[in-house]
Image (cartoon, rainbow, N blue to C red):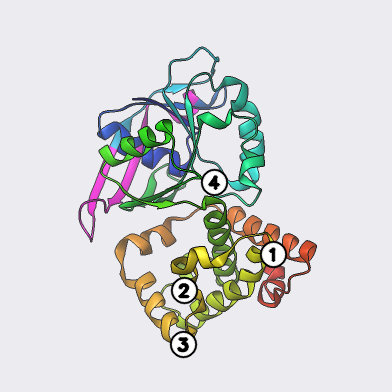
Amino acid sequence: MKILMFGRGVIATIHGWALERAGHEVEFYVRPGRAAAYGDTIALELLDVRRRLRGQRVSEKWPVRYRESLEPDHDFDLIVLSVQHYAFAEAAAFLGPRLGRATVLIFNNLWAEPAVAAEPFPADQVAWGFPGAGGGFGDDGVLRGALLPMVFFGTLGRPPTERERAVREAFRQAGFRFREQPDFRGWLWIHFVQNAGLHTQSLKLGSLAGLAGSPGSVREAMLATRELLPLVEARGVDLRRHRGDVWPVRAPAWLTAPVLAWLLGHFPPVRLLLEAHANPEELRAVCRDTLAEARRLGVAAPRLEAAEPSF
């Protein structure tokens, strides 16, 4: 499969590397002038957990191919679009008239209505997913992060199409397992408020890594997320369809917070994800946008309100 990663962000780079290692042809679209600045290789320091629980270390300079223009008559089979939620509308508006015959995999979180956000694309060319990786580029230009074994795919209330099945197969060939989410709209929004709850504490602590080994902070993050579940319901999501995703938040925090805090501090891939994250604006934007929606809908979010000075 010929694949174009839209941009050279963390998620695009890590998954592009994995897809190319599986035999797919991978290129990156970058803004004009960026290719020369980036150079011909990307330095990677990854922990790859797709096949081993504690992961396999990857340290290499990966030769990559860039393009700075995209015409509609291109021959890409798949374009992977993974950007911050606040940059999605601009990216989709640019890519929509240039999609050609390719499938676009929307591979990031969204707080907007997914069907509306995807309107720049033909509906039958859209696939929905969410990555299983993270990290950040350091000041030295090295991408440090972890590649987890699970990615998430879903639809907006219908069975996967042939195009969507082809996308799933490409990731399966690259060694990923995946979970299917038939209500991907609801799943995305639950994940979004889980992040907002988490960041009420990470921003206070100064980093995501500060959560590791801090049961008190993890407990507060879980309680903040619990307060935000009514917001997801107010947006029309039936939480009964997502019992497995909301159970950890609804369970007694005194029981689950110490376990989660221990995992954050002692499970190497997760610890690396927290330590390497390098985009604090993303964390602040998630909190700001969640709080704005809670106020719009009149849903009480006292812990998120209290954390507002940090974002």
Give the numbered dot on residue 247: 2
Q: Position of residue 287 (x, y in %)?
A: 65, 62
Instruction: Give the residue number, with chain letter if any, for mark 3.
Output: 254
Q: Is residue 293 magenta?
A: no
Q: Nearer the viewer, residue 224 or 29?
A: 224
- Identify the mark nearer the N-term, 2 or 3: 2
Amino acid bearing label 1: Ala
Q: Secondary structure at mark 2?
A: helix
Q: Position of residue 157 (x, y in %)?
A: 53, 47
**Separation of disc 1 and disc 2 at Cα?**
19 Å
- Identify the mark nearer the N-term, 1 or 4: 4
Amino acid bearing label 2: Trp
Q: Position of residue 255 (x, y in %)?
A: 42, 86
- Front of the two marks 4 and 2: 4
Classify mark 2: residues with Cα within 10 Å, few (<14), some (14-19) or many (20+).
Answer: few
Amino acid bearing label 4: Leu
Q: Position of residue 109 (x, y in %)?
A: 55, 50
Q: Which residue appears farthest toward the top when viewing the image?
A: 73
Give the numbered dot on residue 234: 1
Classify mark 1: residues with Cα within 10 Å, few (<14), some (14-19) or many (20+).
Answer: some
Residue at 61% across / 47% down in the picture?
Answer: 85
Tell me the quarter of the picture where residue 60 sits.
top left
Instruction: Give the residue number, with chain letter if any, for mark 4.
Output: 156
- Identify the mark nearer the N-term, 4 or 2: 4
Classify mark 3: residues with Cα within 10 Å, few (<14), some (14-19) or many (20+).
Answer: few
User: Cβ–Cβ below 8 Å for labels 2 and 3?
Assistant: no
Q: How many marks?
A: 4
